[in-house]
């Protein structure tokens, strides 16, 4: 499965390292304002997404694949 994120925040968004260790395939560079970034997830999963502001680190995003619950 593939999902996309549009950075409409007006700020740079940094990827949380767990995005990769949880199994998402994504380019590791920071996401610039108005950039679209695709995340490829393992089969039979859906994205769980969290975006937050860490005062010192700036905006961070975590995308984690989870099994779809019926």
Image (cartoon, rainbow, N blue to C red):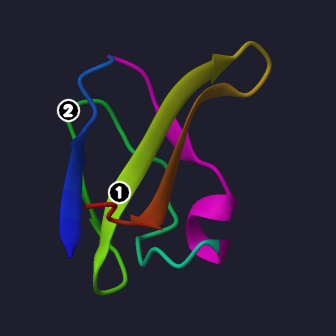
Residue 60 in the figure: left or right of residue 57: left
Across and down, in percent, residue 11 comes to: 42, 21
- Against 56, residue 19 (above or below) is below
User: Which is nearer the eye, 28 or 66?
Assistant: 66
N-terminal-most mark, 1 or 2: 2
Numbered disc 1: secondary structure: strand
Q: Residue 34, position in %: x, y?
A: 20, 32
Q: What is the magenta range?
A: 10-21
Residue sitting at the far bottom: 43
Query: Residue 56 at what x, y percent from top left?
Result: 80, 19
Quadrant in the rendering for residue 9: top left
Name the residue at 53% across, 79% down.
Answer: 23
Q: Which numbered disc covers residue 19?
A: none
- Along the viewing direction, whichever of 33 and 55 lies nearer the viewer: 55
Between circles 1 and 2, the one closer to the viewer is 1
* Mark 1 lies on residue: 47
Q: Residue 53 location in percent, x, y?
A: 61, 18
Name the one closer to the observer, 3 or 45.
45
How far apart are labels 1 and 2 at the CA level? 21 Å
Residue shown at the point (42%, 49%) measured from the top left? 48
Judge from the rendering whether residue 10 lies leftward or rightward of residue 19; answer left or right.
left
**Residue that numbered label 2 is attached to:** 34
In the picture, measured across the screen, residue 38 lies left or right of residue 26, that is left
**In percent of the image, x 41 and y 71: which residue is there?**
26
């Amino acid at each position: 499965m593939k999902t996309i994120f549009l950075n409409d925040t007006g700020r740079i968004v940094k990827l949380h390292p767990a995005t990769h260790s949880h199994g998402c395939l994504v380019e590791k560079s920071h996401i610039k304002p108005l950039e679209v970034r695709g995340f490829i997830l393992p089969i039979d999963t859906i994205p769980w997404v969290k975006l937050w502001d860490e005062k010192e680190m700036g905006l961070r995003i975590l995308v984690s694949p989870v099994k779809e619950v019926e």
